[in-house]
Image (tube, rainbow, N blue to C red):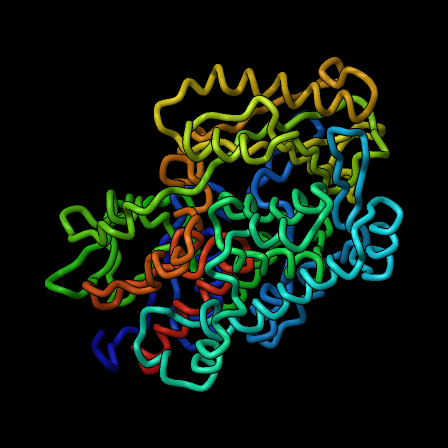
Amino acid sequence: MGKGLKSSTCLVIGSGIAGLAAAIRLSSMGMHVKLFEANSTLGGKIAEKKLAGYRFDIGPSVLTKPDYIMELFLIHGKNPDNYIQFEKLDRLFNFYFPDGTTINSFADPARMEQEIREKSDEPVGNVSRVLNDSKKIYRVTREVFLERSLHKTKNYFNWPTLRGVLQFNRVRAFQTMHSYNSKRLNDKRLVQIFDRYASYIGSNPFEAPATLNIINHFEINEGAYFPVGGMYKIVEALVKLAGECGVEIFSGVAVKEIIVEGKKVKGIQTSDGFKESACVICNADIHLAYEKLLPGKIKPEFILSQPRSSSVIVFLWGINKKFPQIGLHNTCFGENDREEYDAIFNRKTISEDPNVYFYNSSSNYSADAPQGKSNLFAMISAPYEDGQNWEDLVSLARTVVIKKLSTLVGEDIGKLIEVEEVLNPKTIESHTGSWKGSVYGNSSNGMFSAFLRHPNFSKRIEGLYFCGGSVHPGSGIPLCLLSAKIAADLIKGDFKL
């Protein structure tokens, strides 16, 4: 990459949270930013649906690290509280097991310890040690892997990186999540609880490294939050901030191609004509970027050929009743996690006894459902799109999910559904541009998966950068926000901002 590149304008492709964050960061550095979104609505995977008086979040629903969001306001001298409010959750999750038992997780360590004593024979110290170990993993990986580009040689010659290398054994990269969790926890139910964090990024705990236990650190040690009004309030707040900071946003304008001359980016061809700039950030799925936006250009085949993450099947249900036992975040576990992950990743189908996640935002924000009713987001993990008969798989999933939920609440939930919409990997691909409906990019199955994500810049095309869940450092809101920071910092250095 050349030094001292010149451009006063940066073009951002896509309005996912990483694209919005990158635009906001670059505007704070003095760049004029134009953001292009093909859809009429903004936010990428963070979206909402309104149906007959119900409102549903239809993307990410568990929020951690809100400080990454608040930082975007602070760098512009704005008070985040004037744009969005975050409610810290006292009860994080309700976990329901096939034997009829329930374990709840809490933000308060003392209350969590009490819950374990009352519900399990597991020594409380075992859980504390797992959480402390996760905190150590985060401390080691934060400066080395999460907040820096892994693909710039200069980033390896500094004390934080050297310190991280010297402590590499602490990140548990050579042990799977399940192996680590099952050796440290005796209660199978607790192992299931900690293994499930692999599903947050579409991966398999029986293959993914225990390094990914940093996810439980984010949620339990640092806390989970609910944006008052729902997850889409994050998008609305960032769009408002971007507008105030001079970012020009063009919705309903599709980018057809990233224009390259020689080895330098020259701009983008859109449905509204050519837009010139020597600086482009692509927030689209990396597969989509190379297949459609960079036709004829050399692809990083090794990275693009890595196994894809899982997808999901989601049911949005307007339920004609309230159920106090269904909180904001809930998981009903199946009997055999190994079988479920084998079905998803090896047999490319769904399990007949899957773990089911229920998100009930109306429990915290009553306006999301009519009085006396509930808006339920019910989700199971599914394989990415590979020619499956999704009509049959959705039908199977619906039967299984209704049965589990009906058992939980003690009555036939199917008779109470008055509004319904379904998302499957094919519809997710068409709505979000996620390659094959794989909502988390490449999977994190394998000890070196962190090194096999696409970098935040092009090694072949000067002035082209990438952010989002399909590139470094990974998927999920916190990592997408970090990818935006990395991309913006790279541009700051390359363009001498």
- Nearest the viewer among 310 and 449 is 449
Residue 108: % across, % down: 82, 60
Residue 299: % across, % down: 20, 51
Is residue 262 found left or right of 252 in the rendered image? left
Residue 192 seen in the figure: yes
Placement of 36 over or under 353, stated as above or below: below
Placement of 97 over or under 171, stated as above or below: above
Name the residue located 46 percent from the left edge and 42 percent from the top edge.
Answer: 439
Name the residue located 63 percent from the left edge and 33 percent from the top edge.
Answer: 355
Placement of 295 over or under 266, stated as above or below: above
From this viewpoint, which residue is outermost toward the bottom? 159
- Nearest the viewer among 220 and 282 is 220
Q: Quadrant of residue 354?
A: top right
Residue 366 seen in the figure: no
Residue 417: % across, % down: 71, 19
Residue 289: % across, % down: 29, 49
Quadrant (top left/top right/bottom left/bottom right) for the C terminus: bottom left
Quadrant (top left/top right/bottom left/bottom right) for the N terminus: bottom left
Name the residue located 45 percent from the left edge and 86 percent from the top edge.
Answer: 159
Name the residue located 59 percent from the left edge and 52 percent from the top edge.
Answer: 236
Disc tally is 0
Placement of 25 over or under 471, stated as above or below: below
Is residue 409 found left or right of 262 in the rendered image? right
Q: Quadrant of residue 155?
A: bottom left
